[in-house]
Image (cartoon, rainbow, N blue to C red):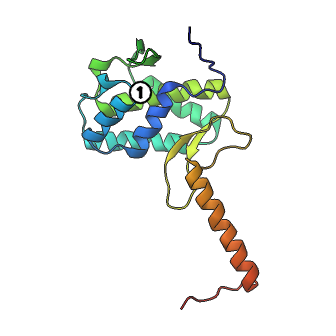
Amino acid sequence: MNTVSTTHSRPFGLRFATAAINTVQTAQQWRALTIEHGDANFADLPFDPDAFACAITELRDLFAEQDLARAADQLNTLLRTSNTSLELHQLPDSRWALRPPIDTHSAATTLRNLTVHALAEWAAECGRCAWGICTADGCSNTFVDEGRREPQRFCSANCATRTRVAAHRLRKRDKETGGLVVPSQ
């Protein structure tokens, strides 16, 4: 029997949600992502690019909120307006997931509902806004903070490393030039 501890393990829907928010812009990308994440039943939902972009904007605003009281207000408003029930569904890989019924929503509404419900569950589990938007220059990916010692600031190890290397180079350059900006030739 496989048992999975839920203590500080991300709800299944959040991995899908962050991937969708960060990468999906087309029906083909939506289809590929739903198959990759083990729920091809969502692959053929109606995909309206404008509605999907609006849902992503709304969800990015939620990921940007770091005050739990304000995030809870946003989540509660979105939960009330989602007008959907959840169902327990077994995925093809035998995991179980709470999700909106498949046949009643578009891709945008499904992403919105899945994300809002998963973030609400995650906030209740963690007691804080354990999510964010990457602070690396040139990156705006969303992420879910999975309980490291320090609050997470980056979406990936690549962004964290790139930022640390850039800061190191800047300190080194400042030390070598005494803080003066040397014009490049």
Residue that appears at 54% across and 25% down = 11
Residue 4 falls left or right of residue 37: right
**Relative vertical location of residue 170 with respect to residue 107 in this rendering, above or below:** below
Residue 178 falls left or right of residue 56: right
Q: Which residue is mark 1?
A: 113
Residue 119 x, y percent position in the rendering: 53, 30
**Relative vertical location of residue 26 with respect to residue 104 in this rendering, above or below:** below
Residue 134 x, y percent position in the rendering: 55, 50
Residue 79 falls left or right of residue 92: right
Residue that appears at 41% across and 27% down = 113
Label 1: few (<14), some (14–19) or many (≥20) C-alpha neighbours in 10 Å: many
Residue 46 x, y percent position in the rendering: 23, 31
**Relative vertical location of residue 153 with respect to residue 86 in this rendering, above or below:** below
Viewer-side residue, 48 vs 12:
12
Residue that appears at 65% across and 85% down = 181
Amino acid type at mark 1 = Asn
Residue 76 shows up from this direction: no
Residue 93 x, y percent position in the rendering: 42, 18
